[in-house]
């Protein structure tokens, strides 16, 4: 009786591993200790730790044209980043990924209908710069 129970447990565990391996091709988000989920595509940014002081300088030189010097947005251009549920709900790595891609005006989720260019329109911004900007924005969020 005990042997059957052990064999059943082993079979269940093996089946679970097989099903997990057949999942969604490795693109499913994972939960990290920091909280929100991180997609496979954003995993490479998890290692970046932002510096909010550097981020403020990078924000001021790139993002203020659309999001304002106080990050409260510019009417008809950029959203208020201090209260943005979208940004607040993203893991830092996902926020960095978003900044690397931007959001075209044709995207149905783009409510301003103004392009959010990749890297804020500043191709010189490195991934670490984007991590710093996100760190800075986190200090402003309400």
Image (cartoon, helix red, strand yellow):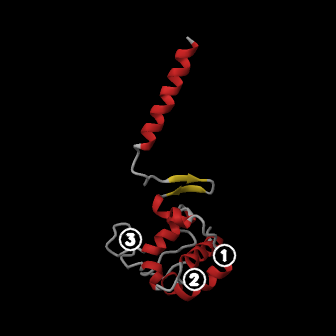
Is 39 drawn above or below residue 142 in the view shown? above
Is 137 drawn above or below residue 63 in the view shown? above
Q: Secondary structure at mark 3?
A: loop
Question: In terms of depth relative to the viewer, which is nearer, 110 or 5?
Answer: 5
Question: In terms of depth relative to the viewer, which is nearer, 119 or 18?
Answer: 18
| Residue under label 2 | 59
Residue 19 location (% of width, % of height): 42, 38
Q: Residue furthest top?
A: 1
Spatial CA distance of label 1 from label 3 is 28 Å
Q: Residue at x 63, y 82 (%)?
A: 56
Give the number of the disc on residue 83. Answer: none
Spatial CA distance of label 2 from label 3 is 21 Å
Residue 38 location (% of width, % of height): 52, 58
The mark lying in front, picked from 1 and 3, is 1
Q: Secondary structure at mark 1?
A: loop
Spatial CA distance of label 2 from label 1 is 12 Å
The disc, 2 or 1, on the residue closer to the chain's N-terminal end is: 1
Residue 118 location (% of width, % of height): 43, 78
The disc, 2 or 3, on the residue closer to the chain's N-terminal end is: 2
Q: Quadrant of the C terminus?
A: bottom right
Residue neighbourhood size for the residue with mark 3, other residues' Cα within 10 Å, grouped as few (<14), some (14–19), many (≥20): some
Give the number of the disc on residue 51. Answer: 1
Question: In terms of depth relative to the viewer, which is nearer, 16 or 106?
Answer: 16
Q: Residue at x 52, y 70 (%)?
A: 96
Residue neighbourhood size for the residue with mark 1, other residues' Cα within 10 Å, grouped as few (<14), some (14–19), many (≥20): some
Give the number of the disc on residue 110. Answer: 3
Residue neighbourhood size for the residue with mark 2, other residues' Cα within 10 Å, grouped as few (<14), some (14–19), many (≥20): many
Horizontally, is 102 left or right of 49 in the view? left
Question: In terms of depth relative to the viewer, which is nearer, 4 or 34?
Answer: 4
């Amino acid at each position: 009786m005990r042997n059957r129970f052990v064999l059943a447990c082993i079979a269940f565990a093996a089946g679970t591993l097989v099903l997990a391996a057949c999942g969604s091709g490795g693109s499913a988000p994972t939960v990290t200790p920091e909280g929100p989920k991180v997609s496979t595509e954003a995993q490479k940014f998890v290692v970046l730790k932002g510096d909010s002081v550097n981020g403020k300088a990078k924000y001021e030189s790139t993002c203020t044209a659309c999001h304002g010097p106080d990050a409260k947005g510019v009417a008809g251009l950029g959203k208020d980043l201090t209260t943005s549920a979208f940004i607040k709900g993203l893991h830092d790595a996902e926020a960095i990924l978003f900044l690397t891609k931007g959001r075209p005006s044709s995207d149905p989720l783009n409510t301003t209908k103004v392009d959010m260019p990749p890297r804020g329109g500043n191709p010189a911004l490195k991934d670490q710069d984007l991590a710093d900007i996100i760190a800075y924005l986190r200090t402003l969020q309400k």
